[in-house]
Amino acid sequence: FSHADPDSIRAVPRWHQDPQRAWELMEEDVGANLKAKLQPRRPGENLKVAQTVLKRRDRNLQAAAKRAEQIAKAKAKAKQTKYKGGFKVIKMETLLKQSLDKIKEEKRLKRLPNKKKPKPKKKGQVIALCRNGKKGVPKKVKSVLRDFGLRARHSMTFILNNEESARKLQEVKPFTFWGVPSFKNVYNLVHKKAVFVDKEAAVKKVVLSDNMLIEKHLGDLGVICTEDLAHVIHTGGKGFDEVMRRLAPVNMGDSKKVEGLVEKKHHDCGDLRGRINKVLEALMGE
């Protein structure tokens, strides 16, 4: 009956005996089970539907509900296994690649002391440092990333442009990218994505929403508005270290996916020089 015309389907006897009563019974059944109401093809005509059609509809609804319940249970089980110490299946190729990358990084770190001592950048007082999405970070590099506050992938912070930063940047080069940002991008980052760390509050991280929050968290440093905060960060002025301690790292997107539908083959890493501003603008959606 799936392709037959409803008017041509031979109905059961009770439809011919009392069509009005049959229609009322069907409306009650439809309302009770929250099903779609069946309507005749043309106004004034009697509704003629075979019992097999109605039974098939019921079976389809029951099967769909059962399938949805099974999917929900499977998702709950997968989530529990993923976040509560369950087993996680990893391909052998993935393990091999991670192992080779770690060996490669250990050799690179051993060669660093023999290389020429890096110098800070000539222009700019502050560097915008972003962590890319590359995995397989060695322990030594992880400790340096923690010093910068970049514990999570795709996070960003600001650091001073000095010799110590230049030395550390060489250690974390494959897992980060950096450059000297413009004041416009610093202002937009502060305005759109700044988050304060408040250890005393119930919510540890507070999103910057107005100048009242800036005055509350940074008023003792003479910073009372967004422009003041952006100026201190961009110039690396007085109180820069304390300001950055009270600000959480900015959560940015994946730089591999900012160039439209085509994803980059490799992660951005190292000094991007002037291209850093275009990348930051793309990550902010501008």
Image (cartoon, rainbow, N blue to C red):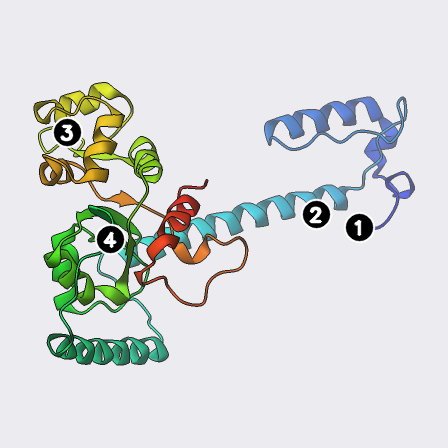
- Residue reaching furthest to the front: 122
Q: What residue did someone put label 2 on?
A: 56
Q: CA distance from mark 1 to mark 4?
A: 55 Å
Residue 197 appears at what percent x and percent y? 16, 35
Answer with mark 1 or mark 4, whichever residue precedes in sequence.
Answer: 1
Report the Cα–Cα distance between label 1 and label 3.
Answer: 59 Å
Question: What residue is at 18 percent from the left and 31 percent from the top?
Answer: 203
The mark lying in front, picked from 1 and 4, is 4
- Upstream in sequence: badge 3 or badge 4: 4
Marks 2 and 1, the one that precedes in the sequence: 1
At 15% from the left and 73% from the top, the residue drawn is 116
Q: CA distance from mark 2 to mark 3?
A: 54 Å
Residue type at mark 2 is Arg
Q: Which mark is residue 235?
A: none
The residue that disc 4 covers is 152
Classed neighbour count for the residue bearing mark 4: other residues with Cα under 10 Å, few (<14), some (14–19), many (≥20): some
Count all numbered tags in the image, as a single digit: 4
Pointer 1 residue: 2
Q: Return the residue at label 3.
A: 202
Circle 2/circle 1 CB separation < 8 Å:
yes
Residue at the top extreme of this rendering: 212
Q: Position of residue 98 (x, y in %)?
A: 28, 75
